Amino acid sequence: MPVPPPTDRPRIAFAGTPEFAARALDALIGFDCDIPLVLTQPDRPAGRGMKLTPSPVKAHALAHGLTVAQPDTLKTPEQRASLAQAAPDLLVVVAYGLLLPRAVLDLPRLGCINIHASLLPRWRGAAPIQRAIEAGDARTGITLMQMDIGLDTGPMLAECLVDITDTDSAASLHDRLAEAGARLLIDTLPDLLAGRIAPRAQPDAGACYAAKIGKHEAALDFRRPAPELGRRLRAFDPFPGGVMTVEGMPIKLWRAEVLGRPGTPGLISQVDGHGVVIGCGEGSLCVTELQKPGGRRLPVAEFLRGHPLAPGQQAQLPG
């Protein structure tokens, strides 16, 4: 296959799928380089009509006139052909969602680098943002990593720290980390392309796995401490939220304040326009944003007008 003619500008291909990756692609578009190819996952059904919808990365790439490829996998030479033809010096990977085989890792002259939303080796895996909040971490960050065949195990090139506040949801922390990742990429690329960065091996101590978030994790067990449940609500916003079931009706909980007030696990002790207070194994939660099936997320006062709750009602306890 023909190889592009040499140029003074580096050729940097990109692989990513969600909005987190689109922020980095936008930053790369502003960098002094050629982007010969953007890889992203195939269009997926979305919305009420389940219409095939392009990924945020595809939408951003096409808006800037970039070439896009959407292979289902990169396991065969045929599926890798577009990347091989692009002949990149470097491949930037951000939340792509497909495993890169050795043949892809070895294809670019400078290898493949990944923007990962944690301070590695903590929270390797699919859900580092959510798991950091759920665990009560005081800070997280971005690690720019040289990719190897393992799961987020490659040597580190650069990192930056991001504090986690007591009010952060996965959505708000996602946005700050996406911006931090885009900045770190652009700040690091000149030295990386010039060979001025020595990769550092990840330490063995402190490694843990951030498992993908499942819908089943939404069910809240009010026998757990209120601070833990409060973190889960923030970690699972916008997906999958928290769910309690009262008199057979599942209700999603989105925002809550942690109270030191003792209570009976799952028992609603107070209901007013300020919140629905529910007892936990330690302390209580004052829920301030709720959602009934088929409805919208609503502030508590508005929710209660259409779906009243009352003191003395009991949320079902799992198991």
Image: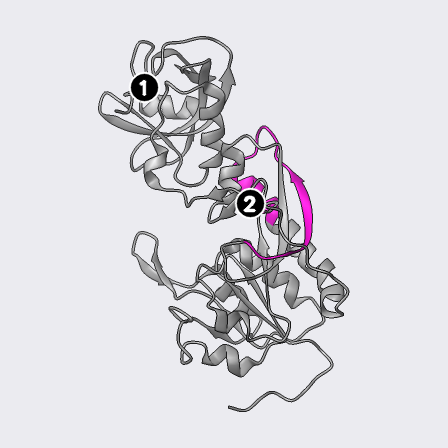
Query: How many residues crowd around disc 2 within 10 Å: few (fewer than 14), some, or many (20 or more)?
Result: some
- The disc at residue 174 is 2
Q: Which residues are magenta?
A: 153-177
Residue 258 drawn above or below residue 59: above
Q: For the point 38% across and 25% down, which residue is it?
A: 303
The residue at which mark 1 appears reads as 308
Q: Foreground: 8 or 103? A: 103
Residue 154 drawn above or below residue 319: below
Q: Foreground: 59 or 176? A: 176
The answer to if 176 sits in the magenta stretch is: yes
- Which residue occupies the extreme front position in the image? 204
Amino acid type at circle 2 is His
Residue 273 in sight here? no
Image position of 60 (left or right of 184): left
Residue 7 at what x, y percent from top left?
70, 84
Task: Provide the secondary structure element on which disc 2 rests.
Answer: helix
Amino acid type at circle 1 is Pro
> Quadrant location of residue 115?
bottom right
